[in-house]
Image: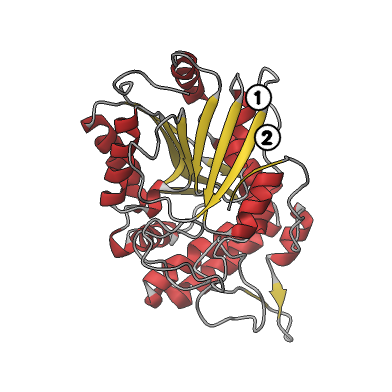
């Protein structure tokens, strides 16, 4: 698919709870004997038939291969399977969008604006958004940049691409026009030639599902084209829960090990990317971009908890019995409005040297 879309419409509202009260109801279920139980995604359901987690929040489908994320296949081994179910539901992406927007590192925008303003002969920005999902990065960033923009959205899921295209930003910070083009397919074979004329490459929650070779490829493509890269919301491997629990650290370590399966970088991704860009002459800036989840984000917290604990149990099945108790208590605290969570992420801005002959827009 390769087209320019008129930006209109909205993402369908998720079928699950959208309010804190609704999330609290979804956070619990009651057995016939009146006791409340929890579900470990990917394991045997303690509450039979309950849909434990929105796809994308945890390990609900087939394990990803190295070099593959839920909405972008970075290595294409053959024809795309049209019947393959999506691993990211738009409901999950919509649920996390406001928290993502609040978390992204605004301090990286000023140096990015300076670089983009210095592009010679600029008639407009061309932005490649890799693994765009429902297009949240464009909706966040385009209204914060001046000048006409053309966003090229890359994703493997045609359903997500459709909504990314029709709900994309309409105008830039100064009122200039923003257009959107959706492209489905393999985006792994990035080369400097593929990015010729690009002003910026963006991605959210992508680096941590790449391996080292793929990060090197991404860095080589961007630096070879002299194209800046803004890569946001990569997991940092640290979580803070208040009140604390003795099992917090063990769950965190198991989750981090799950993130590194199959050679993926997981929480080591930002360090690896910084090294890859720096070695190729780029200036790299890193800023924290933590999720801060409290009673007002209960719907997201419920889904995140189930996915986080589920991944830990998938990595270490011997945790299952203790993890069920842990998840039950955490969901109860969330229901009561007593749970606060900080999920640490990092944003990275890489500013390569301009390509020979000057960057073009």
Q: Are marks 1 and 2 in contact (CB under 8 Å)?
A: yes
Q: Residue lying farthest left?
A: 279
Q: Nearer the viewer, residue 233 or 174?
A: 174
| Protein image colouring | secondary structure
Query: 329 and 269: which one is in front?
Result: 269
Q: Is residue 294 visible?
A: no
Tell me the residue at 55%/19% (across/down).
123
Dot 1 falls on a residue whose secondary structure is loop
Expressed as whole percent of the image width and height from the top left, the position of residue 111 reads: 45, 18
191 vs 174, left or right, is left
Asked if 86 appears above or below 221 in the picture, the reply is below
Q: Look at 47% across and 19% down and name the residue there.
A: 116
Q: Residues within 10 Å of mark 1 (few under 14, many from 20)?
A: some
Residue 74 in view in this figure: yes
Up-down relation of residue 200 to residue 116 (above or below): below
- Marks 1/2: CA distance? 8 Å
**Residue at screen point 26% across, 38% down:** 276
Residue furthest out toward the bottom:
32
What percent of the width, then of the height, locates residue 150? 58, 32
Q: Which mark is residue 8?
A: none
**Occupied quadrant, residue 224:** top left
Q: Check the image and report above or below for 189 versus 315.
A: above
Element type at mark 2: loop
Mark 2, other Cα within 10 Å: few <14 / some 14–19 / many ≥20: many
- The spot of residue 158 in percent (x, y) is 60, 58
The answer to whether 283 appears left or right of 228 in the picture is left
Q: Which mark is residue 172?
A: 1
The residue tagged 2 is 169
Q: How many numbered callouts?
A: 2
Question: Can you tell which quarter of the image residue 332 is in?
Answer: bottom right
């Amino acid at each position: 698919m390769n087209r320019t879309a008129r930006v209109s419409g909205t993402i369908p509202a998720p079928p699950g709870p959208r309010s804190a009260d609704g999330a609290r109801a979804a956070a619990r279920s009651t057995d016939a004997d009146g006791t409340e139980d929890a579900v470990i995604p990917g394991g045997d359901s303690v509450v039979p038939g309950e849909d434990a987690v929105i796809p994308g929040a945890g390990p609900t489908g087939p394990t990803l291969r190295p070099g593959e994320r839920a909405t972008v296949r970075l290595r294409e081994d053959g024809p795309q399977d049209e019947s393959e179910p999506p691993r990211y539901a738009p409901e999950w992406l919509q649920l996390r969008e406001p928290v993502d927007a609040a978390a992204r590192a605004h301090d990286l925008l000023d140096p990015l604006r300076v670089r983009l303003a210095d592009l010679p002969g600029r008639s407009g920005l061309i932005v490649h958004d890799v693994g765009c999902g429902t297009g949240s990065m464009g909706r966040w960033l385009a209204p914060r940049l001046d000048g006409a923009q053309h966003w090229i959205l890359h994703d493997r899921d045609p359903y997500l691409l459709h909504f990314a295209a029709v709900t994309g930003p309409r105008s830039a910070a100064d009122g200039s026009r923003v257009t959107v083009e959706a492209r489905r397919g393999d985006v792994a074979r990035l080369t400097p030639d593929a990015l010729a004329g690009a002003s910026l490459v963006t991605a959210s929650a992508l680096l941590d599902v790449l391996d080292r070779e793929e990060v090197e490829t991404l860095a080589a493509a961007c630096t070879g084209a002299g194209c800046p890269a803004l890569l946001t919301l990569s997991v940092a491997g640290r979580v803070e829960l208040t009140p604390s629990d003795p099992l917090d650290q063990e769950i965190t370590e198991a989750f981090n090990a799950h993130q590194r399966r199959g050679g993926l970088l997981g929480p080591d991704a930002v360090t690896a990317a910084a090294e890859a860009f720096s070695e190729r002459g780029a200036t790299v800036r890193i800023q924290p971009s933590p999720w801060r989840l409290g009673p007002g984000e209960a719907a997201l917290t419920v889904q995140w908890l189930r996915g986080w604990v589920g991944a830990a149990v998938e990595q270490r099945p011997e945790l299952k019995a203790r993890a069920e108790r842990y998840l039950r208590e955490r969901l109860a605290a969330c229901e009561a409005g007593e749970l606060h969570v900080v999920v640490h992420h990092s944003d990275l801005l890489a500013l390569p040297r301009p390509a020979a002959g000057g960057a073009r827009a």
